[in-house]
Amino acid sequence: MDNRIVVVTGAGISVDSGIQPFRGKNGLWNENPTAMASYEKFCNDLAHFLSWYYHRFVSCRDALPNATHEILAASQIRVISQNVDNLHIKAGHDTKRLIEIHGNINYKRKIPVTHREDLVLANWDAVNGLAENTDLSTKPRINDPLVQGLFELFHIGKNGKIDFEHSYRPHILLFDEYYSELYESEIALDWVKEADTVIFMGTSNSVGITNMVLESAMRRGKEIKVVDPNPAPSFRFPGIEIIESSAMDFCREYFI
């Protein structure tokens, strides 16, 4: 097992698996996720929040890992992933060498939970039949069959009332929340300290963890590589190697 390399993956590596990207044509950013994927939305518009995440789950459920996920798993490389799509897990990545820094859409947890041991499977599939009877083109209403099914799944009252001791929420880091022990951010930064090389793949450097990892790696004089066909301008610092390649092609050359 090689601890000299840490790879930070973003949404770009899952596009070849059919996962909707965050930017560009048909990207999730066109749906304003900063407003939707927020704890404020969870508290104040729960029907819309849970329906939106149900559709995120559906988009990931049948997706298969691509060569990038498979090569990283086979290489037993330490990976810090911003993705919640579960594809690194599907590829067989050793969970002791994978940090899903923004969570995993397959899991839920009670609202006050602070330890990863308390995560449980969300079981989104339990409401599939209800979704078939719901008009997905309109904003969800509290009495929609899908919404009521989601409320039951997450232990929410039929009227949408949250019980902050017993209700559940998706295990996702929301835009108005902070990194915590649940997301293993301190372990991620420890991995960066131990590494010689930090490789960013398919990420635009627009969220907190990429800035934290990049700053830590630069301060410690690590070798830094950025792999992206269209790398973000914010990565263009002296000493950073920019590789305008797909993650798949890079992994085939670098790790095999």
Image: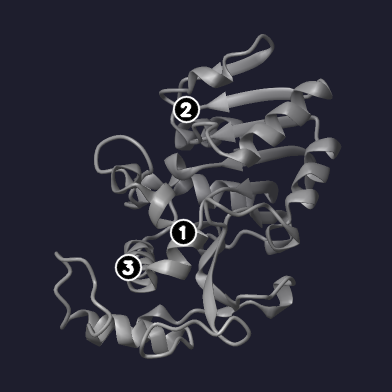
- Position of residue 69 relative to residue 41, above or below, is above
State the image quarter where residue 13 is shown.
top left
**Which quadrant of the figure contains the C terminus?**
top right
Secondary structure of the residue carrying numbered label 2: loop
The kind of residue on which mark 1 rests is Asp
Which circle, 3 or 2, is nearer the viewer? Answer: 3
Marks 3 and 2 sit apart, C-alpha to C-alpha, by: 33 Å
Badge 2 crowding class, 10 Å Cα cut-off, few under 14, some 14 to 19, many 20 or more, is many
Which residue corresponds to mark 1? 85
Gap in angstroms between the C-alphas marked 2 and 1: 19 Å
Res. 228 mark = 2
Residue drawn 52% across and 74% down? 169
Tag 2: amino acid: Asp
- Please provide percent x and percent y for residue 65: 44, 56
User: Residue 51 location, x and y as percent?
Assistant: 32, 70
Up/down of 49 relative to 1, above or below: below
Mark 3 vs mark 1, foreground winner is 3
Whether the residues at callouts 3 and 2 have beta carbons within 8 Å, the answer is: no
